[in-house]
Image: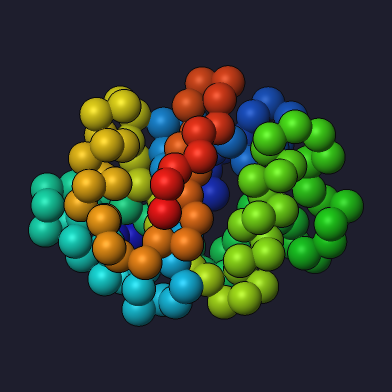
Amino acid sequence: MRPFHLESSMKTMRGVFYPTGWMVLMFPSEQAARAAAQKLEDGGVAEGDVLLLTPDDFRREIIGAAGDDNMLPSAGTEGDTVRKFNELAMQGHHGLMVHAPKHEDSDRILEQLAGSGMSYGQKYRTLVIEDLAA
């Protein structure tokens, strides 16, 4: 697992957070997120394909530097998703971004994380944000 760093490939041309091929998974604590990352790595997910996001990372890099609701996308699923990330980050939740470009990758990751206490999850596919069962 490596720390989160927002890369240009994780944003749309308009600068909206949209990391196609990645899952963003939220956990109620840093300890729970780290334990989930360890499960993934033990199950064969490459260390570089798992990123840890702190509440500060969400506020600074995804929600906006000031944490101001005006920074959030205003329309569509992207806005609702980012608002949910904001709500959970403000409660202290941590996140994992897991590279899962194929549907089978997502299924395998969710199987590995069964019972891990995931509080929220999204998979960013081309033109679709898919809700993941917690």
**For residue 81, side relative to residue 115 (left or right):** right
* Color scheme of the displayed model: rainbow
* Quadrant for the C terminus in the image: bottom left
* Quadrant for the N terminus in the image: bottom left
- Residue sitting at the far top: 127
Query: Residue at 73% of width from left, 42% of height from top?
Result: 79
Image location of residue 103, percent across then percent down: 31, 27
Query: Residue at 68% of width from left, 64% of height from top?
Result: 87
Number of numbered discs present? 0
Which residue is nearer to you in this view: 62 or 113? Answer: 113
Image location of residue 51, percent across then percent down: 38, 56
Residue 105 visible: yes
**For residue 113, side relative to residue 130 (left or right):** left
Q: Is residue 75 above or below residue 40?
A: above
Q: Is residue 41 above or below residue 72?
A: below
Q: Is residue 4 above or below residue 78?
A: below
